[in-house]
Image (cartoon, rainbow, N blue to C red):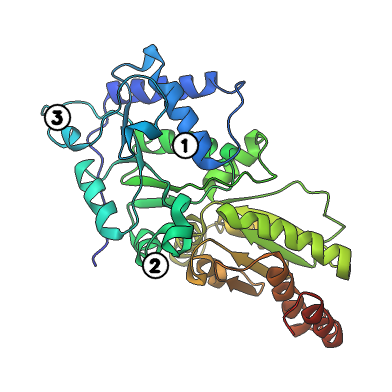
Amino acid sequence: MQPTIFTPPPSTAATRRSAAACLAALAGQGGQRLPMSPRGALAAIAARLRQDARLDGHLHIVSTRAPQDEAPGRPLQASAWQLRFGRPGQAETPLLYLVHAQSVESLRALLQASCGRGIVCNDAEAEQARTHWPKGVQPALPAWLAAQPGCMPFDPASGAEACAILEGALRALYLERHPGFYYLATHDAEVAQGGALSADDAAAACQGMYRLSSVHDHGPAQVRLCGAGSTLASASGAAVLLWQHWQVAAEVWSCTSYTRLARDARAAGHWNLCHPSAPPRSAHLQRCLGDSAAPVVAVSGYGRQIAGQIGGHLRARVVALDFDADASWMAIAALKALADQGSFELRRLEQALRRYGYA
């Protein structure tokens, strides 16, 4: 299946005004409490934006959900097809697309209707238990997303992350005129790290990862734990187990987009190769994790190939885990990585396996 790049329409002052109006409306909601889950936060944001009279003509909100699932407000568009057949020369308007797409085919159909543009928020993970697929989508979907140059996929862990990424997407697509679309996988779990983000953390989340401020940091990290979306809770839980049971210090990182991190690292490497006499560029991934040889254990809600995208861009060993890794299995993987480099005794690793029920 060939990758697709969706080119934005020509830049216009009207599009920039619409994006600025949306960003101003989002900034005005900063003092209002949002749900801590990404799905709940985005639904609440969409409902408030629909009720904001200042955004008439500045924002399209399209939902493929059943009407009874939506909050009251102005009627939602049920399809983006009218955007495809807009008047010639009509300025592009920001699009927030609330969808339930489980397959590549369904997502491609939605993108065809929107001309491959917009901010797509997929809540398929809400029915993961019924489908038995990781994050409620067919296994081909995450691989397809990662292979699309015009797609910037994110997996926010909290409502605060989802809000930050939404604002970043509006700037990137409609002010800076980046091609393609943004994709946010959303879930209903309310994670402990649900509070507001600092400006620095919000900016870093839009670049793919940021470090959690945690009471579980105990000096220089012996291992780094990375989690995306709902699996961030496993990384945080593993950090607790590692310190309480084995006195192993760990950092915890929220990786909102392994794909963005890997692309950025590849781009920096390519630029450095082509400009050997210029000061080298460093990618966001390397600025975050590149200063240490401590092992990295990474997990996402998908198969291990998604988290594994960062493996070739760090000098530290990267252990990518499958979607079903819980806190104890992440702790075991971290201890095994330390044992492999001689920093943890094998007999203690065997004790850990027994303690967590894996022996």
Under mark 1, the amino acid is Leu
Q: Label 2: which residue?
A: 139
Q: Earlier in the sequence, mark 3 or mark 2?
A: 3
CA–CA distance in space, label 3 to label 2: 34 Å
Examine the rendering and report whether any part of residue 135 can be seen: no
Is residue 189 positioned above or below 237 on the image? above
Q: CA distance from mark 1 to mark 2?
A: 25 Å
Mark 1 in CB contact with mark 3 (< 8 angstroms): no
Check contact, mark 1 vs mark 2: CB within 8 A: no
Q: Residue visible at 25% across and 58% down?
A: 105
**Residue 104 location, quadrant:** bottom left
Q: Determine crowd level at label 2: few under 14, some 14-19, many 20+ residues with C-alpha closer than 10 A.
A: some
**Quadrant assignment for the N terminus:** bottom left
In the displayed structure image, the side of residue 36 where residue 356 appears, left or right: right
Total numbered circles:
3
Q: Which residue is the site of mark 3?
A: 86
> Tag on residue 166?
1
Q: Earlier in the sequence, mark 1 or mark 3?
A: 3
- Is 251 located above or below residue 202 in the figure? below
Label 2: element kind:
loop
- Residue located farthest toward the top when viewing the structure as drawn: 53
Secondary element at tag 3: loop
Q: Amino acid at mark 2?
A: Pro
Spot occupied by residue 222 in the image (x, y as percentages of width and height): 80, 67
Residues tagged 3 and 2 counted as in contact (Cβ below 8 A): no
Q: Report the residue at 49% width, 29% height from top.
A: 44
The amino acid on which the numbered mark 3 sits, given as a three-letter code, is Gly
Q: Nearer the viewer, mark 3 or mark 2?
A: 2
Q: Is residue 143 left or right of residue 314?
A: left
Is residue 148 among what the camera can see?
Answer: yes
